[in-house]
Image: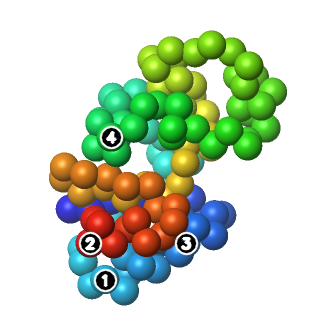
Amino acid sequence: MITIYHNSRCSKSREGLKMLEKSGRDFKVREYLKEPLSKDEIRDLVVKLKVVPIQLVRKGEAIWKENYKDKDLGDEEIIQILSENPKLIERPIIENEDKAVIGRPSSNIDTIL
């Protein structure tokens, strides 16, 4: 099953959702601001995305700039921060059973479909 980690206020996330709808594939929508990801779920996504946790961070967000920008943080600390502040997670993320992509640019989504 494909899952899109979605923020309806984000144009790129809405674009990703439209791509999934047009694909005809079954998928579920997880509005991660309303249903935040656990630390284990974030760790799982990091593995599937083949990234390090800092690559999931939206560094332009005020929360990051004001509280974490100049700190030397380890991976587990970043995962904790993301679980407590889901707004900081890059979006959209599209996941299937064994792989995930960040839908920026939206053409990345094609690799899941």
**Residue for point 73% across, 43% down:** 60
Q: Position of residue 56 (x, y in %)?
A: 51, 40
> Disc 1, disc 2: CB below 8 Å?
yes
> Of 75 and 89, which appears nearest the observer?
75
Q: Describe the element under mark 2 as helix, strand or loop.
A: loop
> Of 38 and 23, which appears nearest the observer?
23
Q: Which residue is mark 4?
A: 50
Question: Does the image show residue 38?
Answer: no
Q: CA distance from mark 3 to mark 2?
A: 17 Å
Q: Amino acid at mark 3?
A: Arg
Where is residue 7, by image quadrant? bottom right
Q: Which residue is mark 1?
A: 23
Q: CA distance from mark 1 to mark 3?
A: 14 Å
Q: Which of pointers 3 and 2 indicates the residue nearer the eye?
A: 2
Q: Amino acid at mark 2?
A: Leu
Q: Which residue is mark 3?
A: 14
Classify mark 3: residues with Cα within 10 Å, few (<14), some (14-19) or many (20+). some
**Residue for point 20% across, 62% down:** 1
- Tag of residue 67: none
**Residue for point 42% across, 79% down:** 19
First along the sequence among labels 1 and 3:
3
> Disc 1, disc 3: CB below 8 Å?
no
Q: CA distance from mark 1 to mark 4?
A: 24 Å
Q: Which of pointers 3 and 4 indicates the residue nearer the eye?
A: 4
**Which quadrant is home to the C terminus?**
bottom left
